[in-house]
Image (cartoon, helix red, strand yellow):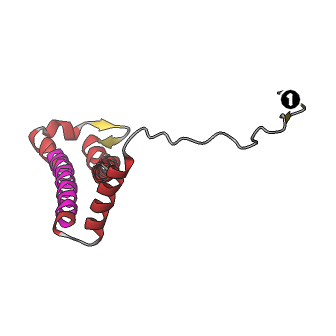
Amino acid sequence: MSRDHGFEIRPRGESTRPPRRRRVVLADSKRRTRQVARTIMELEEQTSVGEFLVRHLMKVQLRSALLLAGFALLVLLGLPALFYVLPSLGDTVWFGMHVSWLVLGVLPYPFLVLVGYLCVRVAERHERDFIHMVEQ
């Protein structure tokens, strides 16, 4: 056989059909697909298994949110207690203002933004873990 400008010249009797394709299966994806479909169906139909999975996700998210809220409350309530225990710290002046006003009036806002950011990140991580568990 010779090729000329991309065209193939074949002798008369030879078939022009391309070779048969073969299917190569690397993994049994049907079994996994059925499991994922069954779990999604249980979630959509709100069966007892799906209800348990969603309830578990909600408990995990609530637990992490309460832990972060408790941490924030502990820190915010600890600041006035710190100035009560160390009154000399409240008399210190920085940038023309008492440290107590700076710490109690300015620092809580960036701290609360950070706690809110962490709360969202943790909730998204729990949701990703939940989706990963459902897809397995």
Q: Quadrant of residue 86?
A: top left
Outermost residue to the front: 13
Mark 1, residue position: 3
Please report the residue visible at 22 percent of the width from the left and 55 percent of the height from the top: 61
Q: Which residues are magenta?
A: 51-79
Outermost residue to the bottom: 45
Please report the residue visible at 84 percent of the width from the left and 34 percent of the height from the top: 11
Task: Judge whether residue 9 is colored magenta.
Answer: no
Q: Quadrant of residue 6?
A: top right
In the rendered view, does 99 fall on the left or right side of 59?
A: right
In the rendered view, does 134 fall on the left or right side of 55?
A: right
Residue 37 drawn at (x, y percent) = 33, 60
Q: Main secondary structure of the magenta part?
A: helix
Looking at this view, is 35 or 19 the one in front? 19
Please report the residue visible at 44 percent of the width from the left and 41 percent of the height from the top: 25
Q: Quadrant of residue 9?
A: top right
Please report the residue visible at 80 percent of the width from the left and 39 percent of the height from the top: 13
Q: Mark 1 falls on what kind of element?
A: strand
Looking at this view, is 69 or 136 the one in front? 136
Looking at this view, is 117 or 40 the one in front? 40
Residue 33 drawn at (x, y percent) = 36, 54
Outermost residue to the top: 2
- Is the residue 42 above or below the residue 108 in the image? below
- Is the residue 53 above or below the residue 76 in the image? below
Residue 57 drawn at (x, y percent) = 22, 57
Type of the residue with mark 1: Arg
Looking at this view, is 20 or 89 the one in front? 20
Outermost residue to the right: 5
Q: How many marks?
A: 1
Q: Quadrant of the N terminus?
A: top right
